[in-house]
């Protein structure tokens, strides 16, 4: 799965991601793949989100200090459902990826009535009916397909 994830990031134009992020994505994809998705597809979606949100950089703070880690988890000054702070997410790629995967799964369920390409809308904007969120979802899903193809090609070699 490491070669798959590295190839997926490379296909999107990202520099080699931090090994801890690769490991965390591998774990999430293997242990908790998205409902109805293969490990590879789960990994590709997570790669696409991390790529678009931070270029795959683990210790990243954005949105004027309210979004954290590779997946730009929006917390403001709060904590995650797991009780983790933004600083903890920036310091631990596994925590960051766990939260991102949970939020992506939740978005997928909440937006189940939408086309598959739009189901990350709630991840992107908090609600399924956001046109901007749907557009962002389509972007991430387009990138995920590109990452999936590249990852599979690398894994087959």
Image: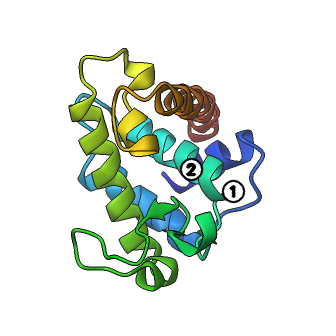
Residue drawn at point x = 38 percent, y = 56 percent: 100
Q: Which residue is mark 1?
A: 55
Using a 10 Å C-alpha cutoff, classify the residue at mark 1 as few (fewer than 14 neighbours), some (14 to 19) or many (20 or more): many
Residues tagged 1 and 2 counted as in contact (Cβ below 8 A):
no
112 is higher (above) or lower (below) than 61: above
Residue drawn at point x = 56 percent, y = 50 percent: 5
Report whether 121 appears left or right of 7: left
Q: Which residue is mark 2?
A: 5
What is the secondary structure assignment of the residue under circle 1? loop
Horizontal and vertical percent position of residue 127: 34, 37
126 is higher (above) or lower (below) than 86: above
Instruction: Using the image as rendered, state which of residue 47 and residue 3 is in the foreground.
Output: 47
Residue drawn at point x = 55 percent, y = 33 percent: 136
Horizontal and vertical percent position of residue 99: 33, 62
Using a 10 Å C-alpha cutoff, classify the residue at mark 2 as few (fewer than 14 neighbours), some (14 to 19) or many (20 or more): many
Quarter assignment of residue 94: bottom left
Instruction: Using the image as rendered, state which of residue 144 and residue 119 is in the foreground.
Output: 119
Horizontal and vertical percent position of residue 8: 62, 43
111 is higher (above) or lower (below) than 30: above
Horizontal and vertical percent position of residue 7: 66, 45
What is the secondary structure assignment of the residue under circle 2? helix
Report whether 133 appears left or right of 9: left
């Amino acid at each position: 799965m490491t070669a798959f994830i590295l190839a997926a990031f490379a296909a999107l134009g990202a520099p080699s991601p931090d090994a801890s992020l690769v490991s965390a994505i591998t774990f999430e994809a293997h242990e908790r793949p998205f409902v109805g998705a293969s490990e590879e597809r789960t990994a590709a979606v997570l790669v696409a989100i991390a790529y678009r949100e931070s270029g795959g950089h683990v210790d990243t703070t954005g949105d004027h200090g309210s979004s954290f880690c590779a997946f730009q988890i929006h917390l403001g000054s709060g904590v995650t459902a797991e009780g983790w702070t933004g600083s903890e997410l920036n310091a631990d790629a596994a925590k960051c990826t766990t939260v991102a995967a949970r939020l992506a799964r939740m978005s997928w369920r909440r937006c189940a009535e939408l086309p598959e390409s739009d189901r990350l809308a709630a991840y992107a904007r908090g609600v399924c009916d956001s046109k901007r969120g749907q557009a962002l979802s389509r972007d991430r899903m387009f990138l995920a397909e590109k990452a999936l193809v590249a990852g599979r090609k690398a894994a087959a070699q």
